[in-house]
Amino acid sequence: GQQVMQIPQYQHVQEGEDFTTYCNSSTTLSNIQWYKQRPGGHPVFLIQLVKSGEVKKQKRLTFQFGEAKKNSSLHITATQTTDVGTYFCAAGTTDSWGKLQFGAGTQVVVTP
Amino acid sequence: KAGVTQTPRYLIKTRGQQVTLSCSPISGHRSVSWYQQTPGQGLQFLFEYFSETQRNKGNFPGRFSGRQFSNSRSEMNVSTLELGDSALYLCASSRGGAADTQYFGPGTRLTVL
């Protein structure tokens, strides 16, 4: 069935550096959402993308939805220690019968 | 507005026992979804309740069940616990349903010994 692949699984980043995490699907997505889970916490909604090629920014975070609506990316600039956590993408698809398919997440560790 | 609350926060049970977890959604949200989170399997969708009816179900055995009350509060029950049921159980509420923005509660950490 439909799977949402998220890469990389782990990301070690030096404070101040940039990094990108990717979310890929083999089928067209109706929308994509991004969540962040801090260590010991619960997932918190960050943003939703719906339109082909859509780009949204939240301070140092830039979210993009691919033109074909099969992939998405989250780019963080000038990483800070507060960015530590696991970032999940969650996709709505026509086959997912009204529920989200969560990616496995990218666990981000920031070295000061 | 108060967020999603879950009780209890931590639970230790032994194999074969059953457990009931509770979730109170954000006021005005009629949809409550349950997820199981483990290091190996990530976030797995269990089921969704909307207006007291199960509207969506994931691929979990019948030992996992739930219900929703008229005030939108939801409970999840797991019978005949197995070691592999040890996980963080997250409840999420939303306005529109399980494909809508999910507002997660803090979770219940279940350990099965």
Image: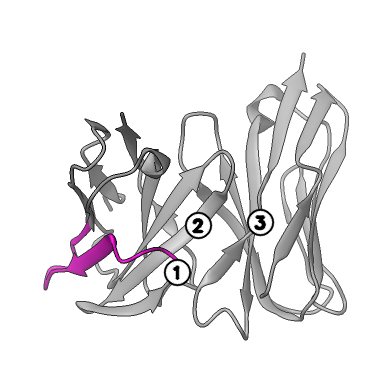
Residue A3, x across and y down, in percent: 69, 67
Residue B44: assigned label: 2
In three-dimensional space, the C-alpha distance between marks 1 and 3, rounded to whole angstroms, equals 15 Å
Q: Earlier in the sequence, mark 2 or mark 1?
A: 2
Residue B70: assigned label: none
- Mark 2: amino acid: Gln
Residue B58: assigned label: 1
Tell me which segment is drawn in magenta.
B58-76
Q: Nearer the viewer, mark 3 or mark 2?
A: 2
Give the structural element (helix, strand or loop) at label 1.
loop
Task: State which chain disc 3 sits on.
Answer: A
Q: Taking B78 as reference, is A107 above or below it?
A: above
Q: Mark 3, residues whose alpha carbon is within 10 Å: few (<14), some, or many (≥20)? A: many
Q: Residue at x 31, y 29 (%)?
A: B113
Residue B92, x across and y down, in percent: 38, 58
* Residue A96 placement, left or right of A54: left
Magenta span has B56? no
Q: Residue at x 54, y 29 (%)?
A: A39
Residue B79, x across and y down, in percent: 22, 53
Q: Residue furthest bottom?
A: A94
Same chain for labels 2 and 1? Say yes or no. yes
**Colour option used:** one colour
Magenta span has B66? yes
Q: Residue at x 53, y 52 (%)?
A: B43
Quadrant housing the C terminus of chain A: top right
Residue A103: assigned label: 3
* Residue B104 placement, left or right of A64: left
